[in-house]
Amino acid sequence: MIGVLAERIDTGSLPRTGDDLARVFEAHYKPLYRAAYRVIGNATDAEDVLQSVFLRLARGDLDVDAADLGRYLHRSAINAALDLCRSRWRSGRVTLVDDRHPRQSETPHAAEAADLRAWLRRALTTLSPRQAEMFVMRYLEGYDNQEIARLLDTSRAVVAVSLHRARTRLQREFRRLAGTS
Amino acid sequence: MSRRPSDDPFELAVRAVRDDGPSDLQVEGSRRRLRERLSGVHAARPSPVSRVGPPRVSRSRLALWLGAGGAVAAAAAVGLLLVGRPRVHAPAVSREPSDPSSMPDRLAGGAVSPGSTEEGRRAPTTPAAPTTEPQRLERQNPSQRSRADLHGEIVASEGAAFAQRKDLYAYAAFENWQVLPSPFAAAKIGKIDLVPGLVGTALRVRPAPRDSVPYAGLTFVLPVRAPLADGVTTRQQALDTQPPGPAPVDDLSMRFHVWLTPGFEFGKGGVLPGLLATPRQETGEGNEHGQRYVSVHFAWRPTGHLALIIEGAPGAKQSVTLPDPITLGRWHALALRVKLNTPDASDGTVEAWMDDVKVATLAGLRLRDDPALHLNRVLFRVRFPRPAPGSTGSASEILFDNLAAATGHLAARRP
């Protein structure tokens, strides 16, 4: 699952030089980009998110152990993407969605899937930042509760309860939207 | 009874997002762009992203990012961060309640409400059913069309005040089939003819037989020329198929009236007209897919909702579904304003109106990278989906009337 992604992109040492940063960039960019894209659903915004993450890394603003660099960047990308979604939603703006496969996207099934994606992405902005982060890490990025607890410096029980509440809330919201009890 | 996980819409939504991803080409293109953008960054200003992981700890690590560079590159990179990205502002639509009687079913031959039109009044007409007695489209000598004729047509269709506009770049009320540009007459896909419209006649487009082409419809590019009031003597000149070259227009509006038959099959969605910027001179089917272009056009979704599609801009093709559905059997006025971005900046905008209600504002767009690219075509593009199995699609017809392009605002009041 996607949880292995973080294992794959750990590089073992913090970037200290331009070469290091280039190496980290090349090793991490693609999986991070895909993670940000999943949250935002827009290629341009995902690129912006990655730019901000790598700029912070380049500036040395990130406090992270070398062993956790991959997971840390992954989490940073998720949070930055969620922040962007929230700010868009608060300002009454939504994001253009990519329409890369026009013929496929015009099928009823694809249109329905697009609607579902749009709903879930918007619904994520209604959760608390921590709940949203946990939700994305658990359900979209494939981390298990123990990994999430470690990364967020909390307990598995807290993660489980938060995820349960987030999921229940989203399901209730979805049923309300769909007009079902 | 509980649903199986695979049937749970919530699970489906999670899976849809989880499985959503950019194409490999997009990822690679983005990687190259960002690497180039970040090269040379050092001592960058604080990131606008407010929450990226745990609290920061200062670490002396000036980034010599991917080689040499300087403050200019850093500022440019951060500047890109600060610039807005494509956004849609779809305000809550408030409008008067729908009044089905305001536009009687034209198939029933009802009279058109006189209703106000922009900058003038519309002459009331007694339309006949659009499906009867279509005129054959046979192009005749366009030089027969005089400026006075064109002026009279605009006055009849839009009112005297509208005809005085100095910023009018293109106009087509489809009143005189003799002077329709040749691609209309030569369209090989779809069926086109003239039928009674808002005033006089309207252009009717119907899908081609199911077996003919995957998409039925027509694509024709109306070039934007010098303002009609400044020397264009015939409409054929205004809508010439061989324009002298792109006009240096970076901010252009268009408007047209559209009517979809009752029983129209939205199918898998279809394409409606819009605006196009292209350096290419050729016109006709498919030319919007040139090497460098950007088009912004309307579309309809399978649900019947209106949509805006942006194609050809740097990055992926993008679209947004607008809040309002298209009402069948009723004229709608659709308007679009496209303002190209300053090259290398994300300050382009696209605005859309439906029946004079703004339904979308897209800001912070990067529509072009090439400063030589200007808005120079009305992209008259209509594409129908394949009819559903068992259907001929014959119930699906679209009528167009009063298409105008101008550098100033074009009101889109519902007829």
Image (cartoon, rainbow, N blue to C red):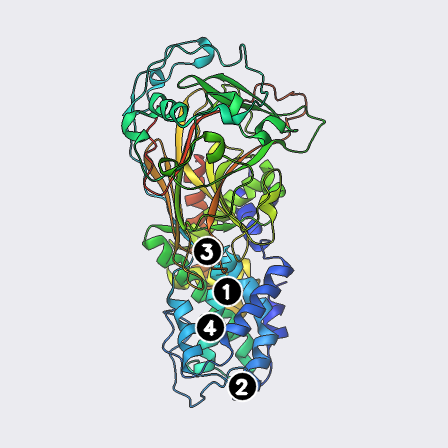
Cα separation, mark 1 vs mark 2, equals 20 Å
> What amino acid is at disc 1?
Glu
Observer-side mark, 3 or 2, equals 2
Q: In this view, does A18 lie to the left or right of A63?
A: right
Do badges 1 and 4 share one subunit? yes
Q: Say the numbered circle drawn on residue A47.
A: 1
Q: Say the numbered circle drawn on residue A164.
A: 3
For the question of whether residue B202 can be seen, the reply is yes
Residue plotted at (60% across, 75% down): A26
The quarter of the picture where the C terminus of chain B appears is: top left
> What amino acid is at disc 2?
Gly
Query: Does the residue at mark 2 contact the one at mark 4 (Cβ under 8 Å)?
Result: no
**Chain letter of the residue beneath label 2 in the structure image:** A
Residue pointed to by mark 4? A53
Residue pointed to by mark 2? A18
Q: Is mark 4 on a helix, strand or loop?
A: helix
> Measured along the vertical axis of the image, is residue B253 above or below residue B162?
below
Do badges 3 and 2 share one subunit? yes
Residue A131 image position (x, y, % from top left): 42, 60
